[in-house]
Image (cartoon, grey):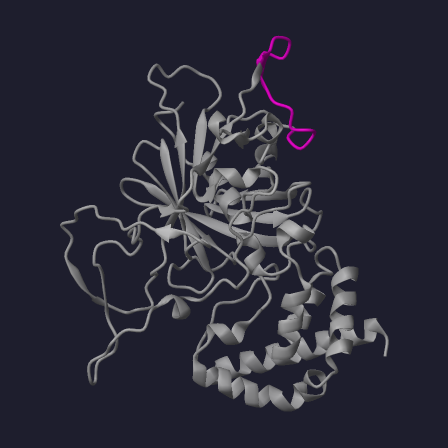
């Protein structure tokens, strides 16, 4: 049997499994949200479901998956290695995800074959969005803004395609407006921004003046210690459902310089990455790299003692469902600090200019490049400090490019870029 025939059968099997899952959901009476053609595939979905449902689905699929689960390990490894090597870009790379969705044995081999984003430079699974980018070349993406819905969509690719069919959605964010401030909720899909959803990735919260933004991750970073948030509060607490978001970990802070005299000019920004040590950018350094999956909230909720006849309950603020449940994370090392690269004034064009290497074509106050700003005592070479780690700029109406590289992840880079879209009355 040829490799293409195997992949074709895997796709048919995946479609059949998806239809059975949908029928099972309909049988339970749940009117789930409609999916998006750009959404991440249902990868490792059984880990995001109750144990009873997992067991039921395993029994339903056991007979259909039997002949594939019993393949010799050597043959299985060779098949997945061939698929992984041949399908390097999206949308063809969804065949690698299909291999991981066949059964448990295929999933384990696929996780072993697929390297981290830093090593292979390819985004495959949702966990790749939390892994640092490659060192040698940036990951090129673009952001599409929808003014009507205050939604921002991050796609993989150089620029938008004509029909949008081949655009791979990585992350989506929505601006939530409140009485005194705004916030951004980041999700894996473009049609579900609930903080209690399994697609919730993180959020971005500014202060009142728009000069400081805090990036919260839904999961604790690797090898990091969470410092307790000991700020006093006068809020009353009550018992609520444990499905409320428990993971809001302060992983970064973005600060814009306050402009007192309101003089026009480029913005000055600084990013403190609490979860990334500064020494990771030197040769041989290593940034925290998660290798698991993006867990659902059911897995984040710790085991709670329950009383007879009562559901488990937790203490949570009754006035804010998005409260900061932890302080900044600590890596026990000096955190990495990024600053925007200073532009130069062009006399002929009468504007501030930066070399975006053709990736930015429209002048905008939102355009920026970030480089490392480290203490000279750390002994990091000047060449490493001159590398552009993140650049963001405008190429058309509501279309922006975003290129990031090691040690930032797609989630961290996207959250930093979202700060450019918020109103900053004290900085302009």
Toward the top, the furthest residue is 347
Say whether residue 423 is left or right of residue 131.
left
| Residue 369 locus on image (x, y percent) | 56, 30
Residue 327 horizontal/vertical position (percent): 31, 48
Q: Nearer the viewer, residue 337 or 176?
A: 337
Task: Inspect this view and state whether residue 28 appears.
Answer: no
Which residue is rendered at x = 33% and y = 69% of the image? Answer: 302
Identified at 58% across, 89% down, the residue is 60
Which range is magenta? Answer: 345-360
Total marks placed: 0
Residue 179 as seen in the image, left or right of residue 277: left
Residue extending furthest toward the right: 2
Q: Quadrant of the C terminus?
A: top left
Image quadrant of residue 245? Answer: bottom left
Where residue 311 sits: x, y (%)?
25, 78
Q: Residue at x 60, y 61 (%)?
A: 125
Magenta segment main secondary structure:
loop
Is residue 169 on the magenta stretch? no
């Amino acid at each position: 049997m040829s490799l293409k025939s195997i992949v074709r059968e895997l796709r048919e099997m995946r479609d059949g499994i998806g239809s059975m899952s949908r029928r099972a959901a309909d049988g339970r009476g749940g009117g789930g949200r409609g999916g998006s053609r750009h959404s991440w595939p249902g990868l490792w979905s059984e880990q995001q479901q109750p144990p009873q449902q997992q067991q039921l689905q395993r029994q339903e699929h056991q007979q259909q998956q039997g002949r594939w689960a019993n393949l010799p390990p050597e043959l299985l490894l060779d098949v997945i290695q061939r698929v992984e090597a041949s399908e390097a870009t999206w949308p063809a790379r969804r065949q690698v995800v299909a291999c991981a969705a066949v059964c448990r044995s295929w999933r384990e081999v696929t996780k072993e074959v697929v390297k981290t984003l830093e090593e292979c430079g390819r985004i495959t699974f949702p966990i790749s969005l939390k892994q640092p980018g490659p060192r040698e070349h940036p990951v090129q993406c673009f952001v599409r803004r929808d003014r009507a819905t205050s939604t921002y969509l991050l796609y993989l690719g150089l620029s938008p395609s004509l029909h949008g069919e081949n655009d791979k959605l990585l992350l989506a964010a929505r601006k939530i407006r409140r009485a005194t401030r705004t916030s951004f909720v980041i999700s894996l899909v473009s049609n579900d921004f609930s903080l209690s959803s399994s697609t919730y990735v993180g959020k971005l919260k500014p202060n009142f003046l728009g000069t400081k933004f805090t990036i919260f991750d839904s999961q604790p970073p690797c090898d990091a210690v969470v410092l307790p948030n000991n700020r006093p509060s006068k809020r009353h607490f009550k018992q609520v459902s444990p499905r409320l978001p428990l993971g809001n970990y302060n992983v970064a802070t973005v600060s814009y310089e306050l402009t007192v005299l309101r003089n026009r000019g480029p913005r000055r920004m600084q990013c403190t990455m609490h979860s990334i040590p500064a020494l990771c950018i030197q040769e041989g350094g290593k940034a925290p790299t998660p290798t698991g999956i993006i867990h659902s909230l059911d897995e984040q909720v710790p085991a709670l003692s329950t009383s007879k006849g009562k559901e488990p309950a937790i203490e949570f603020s009754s006035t804010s469902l998005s409260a900061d449940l932890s302080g900044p994370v600590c890596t026990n090392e000096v955190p990495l600090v990024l600053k925007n690269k200073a532009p130069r004034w062009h006399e002929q064009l009468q504007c501030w200019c930066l070399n975006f290497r053709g990736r930015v074509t429209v002048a905008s106050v939102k355009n920026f490049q970030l480089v490392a700003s480290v203490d000279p005592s750390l002994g990091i070479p000047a060449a490493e400090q001159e590398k552009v780690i993140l650049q963001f700029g405008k190429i058309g109406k509501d279309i922006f490019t975003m290129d990031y590289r090691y040690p930032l992840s797609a989630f961290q880079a996207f959250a930093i870029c979202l700060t450019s879209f918020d109103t900053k009355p004290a900085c302009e």
